[in-house]
Image (cartoon, rainbow, N blue to C red):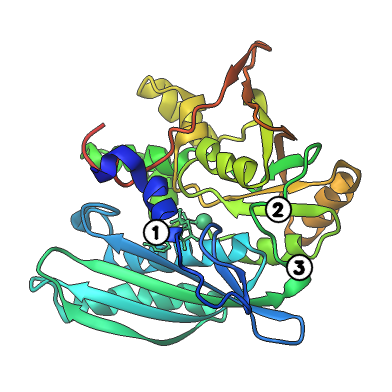
Amino acid sequence: MKLKEIGEFGLIDKIKNETLIDSRKVIRGIGDDAAVFSIGKGRVALLTTDILIENVHFIRNKISPHDLGYKSMAVNLSDIAAMGAKPEHAFISIGIPEDIDTDYIDMFYQGVKELAKKYSVNILGGDTSLSTSGLIINIALTGSAVKKNILYRNTARPGDIIYITGNLGDSKAGLYFVINNITNLDHQALKLINVHNKPYPYVHEGIFLAGCRGVHSAMDISDGLGSDLGHIASESNAGFILYEEKLPVSDELINFCSKFSKDISDYALNGGEDYVLAFTADPKNALNIEKSYYKKFNKKLFRIGEITDAPEIILQLKDGKRKAVTGTGWDHFRHNLTVQ
Ligand code: ADP
Ligand code: MG
């Protein structure tokens, strides 16, 4: 069977079979933003890993080595944040093609270390090898948390309000400039590219939300809001409704979409690489969560919809009409970084 036919998630489902040999200390294996396992006394450790491959996840001459290091750390931090845990130790493995010099690797590590310092993460090891097919980066990151605070994908409840922590679609707009070789970039274009190259990991926010009463589930939006919320819904045996008018978008994205005739809702719903957190919360705790979050971070949370009974997955359009959400998020076997 071709990988394209089953897609990234179909493949992971197949791999999942017979992966738990001794499940006694495993709280969550494959299927969430990070794995969770017991380390005793009500505390748990988390582990997540992400790979970035030249010409699949990035185009080397379109991102500075510093930003590439930064992004590689950010995507891992985002997965630990999505579980509401504190990131701790990183392991970094790189496959380096012959044409890359030490300056490049130095700058890459400056980007990695900038975020490591910001979030107090140690770099404890990794692996280095020659690569015959482009630059390959794999980071594994551990985290820790109190067991009862962890936020999973499969614990959303019908009636929960769905929140996200920031704007959607900017990263995809940034990618548009990158892959279409658009030069002459104005201030707004540079801002969108910066969101794509240097995503903000919501680490402190994730830990804070995990400690809030009434927050039931969370994940980070890496493949696209529609498809990622689909994971929360299916894992929780629930459905959801989203309100198009509530999806937060930046002024830069609004201008981008009108300039390049793009559908802004498509960018918001199916963008990918947004790395905002999506979480669900009990409506009776909602106001408290919003207020205390604002007080702590001086930032708003965005209510974008509700968890409902399965199997409905609905987008209510601005004109009040409803349609089914089709999760056309990023799938590595079905999409690639070619001109779009
Ligand atoms: P994310 O986008 O949050 O990084 P993914 O969609 O990549 O998550 O992965 C979903 C789940 O599948 C995670 O639990 C991840 O650890 C697991 N997973 C992904 N690839 C593999 C693999 N090759 N072998 C085992 N587990 C995998
Ligand atoms: Mg994730």
Q: Position of residue 89 (x, y in %)?
A: 51, 82
Label 1 amino acid? Answer: Ile
Question: Can you give x and y, in whole percent of width and height, for residue 173 in the image?
Answer: 39, 37
Query: What residue lies at 26% left-to-right and 60% top-to-bottom?
Result: 53
Q: Secondary structure at mark 3?
A: helix
Separation of residues labelled 2 and 3 (CA atoms): 10 Å
| Vertical placement of residue 56 versus 27, above or below | above
Q: Which residue is mark 3?
A: 149
Numbered circle sitting on residue 310: none
The kind of residue on which mark 3 rests is Asn
Instruction: Identify the mark nearer the N-term, 1 or 3.
Output: 1
**Of callouts 2 and 1, which one flags the residue occurring earlier in the amino acid sequence?**
1
| Residue position for label 1 | 15
* Residue picked out by circle 2: 217
Label 1 lies in ligand 1 vicinity (Cβ under 8 Å): yes
The spot of residue 226 in percent (x, y) is: 54, 35
Q: Give the alpha-carbon distance from disc 1 to disc 3, as whole Å.
A: 28 Å
Q: Give the number of callouts.
A: 3
Q: Residues within 10 Å of mark 3 (few under 14, many from 20)?
A: many
Q: Nearer the viewer, mark 2 or mark 1?
A: 1
Q: As drawn, is 293 to the left or to the right of 128?
A: right
